[in-house]
Each structure stands twice: as C-alpha cells, then as structure tokens.
Amino acid sequence: MNRILITGAAGFIASHLIKRLLDEGNFVIGIDNFYTGSRVNINAFLGNKNFDFVEHDVIEPYYFEVNQIYNLACPASPPHYQKDPIFTFKTCVFGVINALELAKITGAKLLQASTSEIYGNANICPQDEKYFGNVNPIGIRSCYDEGKRASETLVSDYNRLFGINAKIARIFNTYGENMDINDGRVVSNFIVQALENKDITVYGDGSQSRSFCYVEDLIEGLILFMNSDFTGPLNLGNPCEFTINEFANYIIKLTSSKSKCIYMPLPQDDPYKRKPDISLAKEKIGFSPKYSIEYGLMKTIKYFRERYICS
Ligand code: NAD
Ligand code: UDP
C-alpha cells in the first residue's frame, strides 16, 4: 500500500485525485489551509480509515512518512492568486521547497503541479515542453507564473543535486465537478451565468483561446506520470481548443440558456493562445484524454445545477 501525501487536498483537482487514490487502496494524507479549498470537498473521505487530514499552510515545513507526494497547494484562479500575490509567490516557492525537503528525507517520489502559465503569452502554438515561454516578470499574473517557474527551477535543482525523483507536470486548463462557484475561472463563471440566464462575461473581444481538459482525464495523467520513471517536464491537458467566444456560445447551447454575451476589459497579460502539445505525454506515459468536451461539460453543468442552482 502506498502512503501518499497530497498538498492542497481541499481543492478542486485534489478532491478527484484523493477519491481515485483511495479507491485504488492507497493510504492518503491531505493537507490544506483552506485558502481557496473547501471542507465540502473532503467531507466524504473523513470517515475513511485510509485517509488523514491535517490543516496546515505549506509555506511552513511539515513531516509525514510517505512514499509519494503530490504538491498541489496553490491558488489557481487569477482572481484568487492575484488577491494576495506575496502569499501566492511564497506558496509556490516555500511550498515546493518544503515538499522537496520531505522527498529528500523520505525518498518519496514527488509530482509538482506546474502550469501552462509558465509559457506566458506564448508565441508558438501548440506549446510543447521545449518552449521556454514568454512571461512578463512584473505584471499582475507574475506572482503565479514566475512562482511556478521558480518551482520548476527548484525541482530541477533538487533532482540534479540530490538525485531525488521529482516530476514537473504542466497542467493546462482543467474543469469538472467540485470547482467552486466563486472560483472565477471561465468554465465555472460561464456555466453559472448561463444556468441563471445572466449575462455571460467575455473578457476582451473573446478571440483568445483556451483548451479544456476534463478532470478525470487529468487525474489519469497525473497518476500515470507519478508511476513512471520519467521526470518531465510534461504537458498534461486536452488539445481541444476554443476561442472564448466559441466557448461562451457552446455553454449557452448546452444549457439551453437565454443568456447573451457582454464584453468586458481584457485583464493584463491574458495569454492569447493556449493549446498543449501532448505528444511527449503520449510517448512517455501513454496519456491520451478520452472524455469528449461535451461529456465533461454536461457532467460539470449537472454538478452546478444540482449543487448551487436548484438547492
Ligand atoms: P484550487 O484553488 O481548487 O485548489 C488549491 C488548493 O490549495 C486549495 O484547497 C487551497 O486552499 C490550497 N492552498 C493554497 N495555498 C495553500 C497553502 N499555502 N497551504 C496549504 N494549502 C494551500 O485549485 P486547483 O484548480 O485544484 O489547482 C490545484 C493545483 O493545480 C494548483 O497548484 C494549480 O496551480 C495547478 N493547476 C491547476 C490548473 C487548473 O486548470 N485547474 C491548471 C494548471 C495548474
Ligand atoms: N474569461 C472570460 N470571462 C470570465 C472568466 C475568464 O472571458 O468570466 C477569459 C479570460 O480572460 C481568459 C480565459 O477566459 O482569456 C480563461 O480564463 P481563466 O481565468 O479560466 O484561466 P486562465 O487560462 O486565464 O488562467
């Protein structure tokens, strides 16, 4: 039985990862400070004898006897990570140092949740792992983008200096059940607005693009990656690309909503094109997303309808 630590355990992605790892018979320890996460996301696991939860801020060191670590703790939505940028940067940097120190002491494998944001406003599309990115170091997104880039540097240096097995997963836009209604990212915003027949808030002219991955596909990728010998960096996502205008209209259609789009200012440094090249993930870990965007969005719409709109 693996003993697995998940930081950011009360968050959206972690809630799915914990379920899957418990279902597969592992012992899971979750830590979180509830900065953006919710107790609701872990309530179902609290009675499980194979699950422990500790309220803790990853900026401070910690110790657990484990053989795998998923370092997911970090606010991920632009409004949340920009609210306290110093905290975000500290979470990225001190958080990964504390995870790497634990990996060094225990010999545990570590998977660092990095992001497509490390490519910044990319001037190639799709983005592959060899691309170094085009990132503003002093803008409002920099606390997250540069924080995650610094985390990648630290993972790489710990691997080189101490011969540990730490991996870099570059996660592209992922959506699904357990996203917070106030998360502020495009998928939850548009679904909730459409279900309530309110205006759909498109930022800019809506010609920027994102590629959306259903969370169950991402979880499969994270676990395949953890169980492989490859350390990355590795893109994980779904190359299914939409402009934000197309995405708004698709959500209106799937929800049979009466909503109309309204156009609002584009936030500073909002990347123009985002699409993962996942050839390396296919080659190294056999990763290939299997859920269609329609399937994933219908599951997510059902979740928001049942949990928030009709309750
Ligand atoms: P989320 O906000 O739902 O979850 C993050 C969790 O980390 C929350 O439970 C939060 O309370 C916790 N946290 C934040 N700072 C902490 C700290 N200092 N100490 C302890 N806990 C802390 O976000 P998510 O979408 O589930 O993202 C999880 C991870 O995946 C993040 O590291 C994020 O950067 C990365 N990621 C996510 C996406 C995506 O599309 N969802 C894309 C790229 C990368
Ligand atoms: N966006 C939007 N309306 C919203 C929320 C987001 O038009 O209500 C846009 C945002 O400007 C960006 C894209 O949707 O171009 C994805 O934003 P999100 O915050 O989900 O994630 P990002 O990929 O920017 O981190």
Image (cartoon, rainbow, N blue to C red):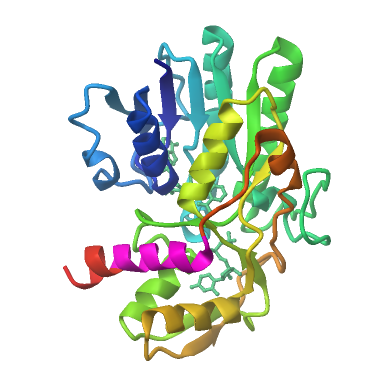
Q: Nearer the viewer, residue 261 or 138?
A: 261
Q: Is residue 289 left or right of residue 284?
A: left
In what quadrant of the picture does the C terminus appear?
bottom left
- Residue at 34% over, 53% down: 178
- Residue at 53% over, 46% down: 218
Relative image position of residue 131 (x, y in whole percent) = 82, 48
Q: In the displayed structure, would residue 233 be above or below residue 300?
A: above
Residue 100 placement: quadrant: top right
- Residue at 51% over, 79% down: 250
Q: In the displayed structure, would residue 103 be above or below residue 170?
A: above
Q: Does residue 101 appear anywhere in the picture?
A: yes
Relative image position of residue 128 (x, y in whole percent) = 78, 49
Q: Does residue 84 appear anywhere in the picture?
A: no
Q: How many numbered callouts?
A: 0
Relative image position of residue 48 (x, y in whole percent) = 22, 28
Relative image position of residue 109 (x, y in whole percent) = 57, 19
Q: Nearer the viewer, residue 79 or 271?
A: 271
For the record, the magenta segment spans 292-304
Residue 52 placement: quadrant: top left
Q: Inspect the magenta stretch and tell me whether residue 282 lies in it.
A: no
Residue 196 placement: quadrant: bottom left
Q: Inspect the magenta stretch and tell me whether residue 303 lies in it.
A: yes
Q: Main secondary structure of the magenta part?
A: helix
Q: Nearer the viewer, residue 268 or 239?
A: 239
In what quadrant of the picture does the N terminus appear?
top left
- Residue at 76% over, 17% down: 160
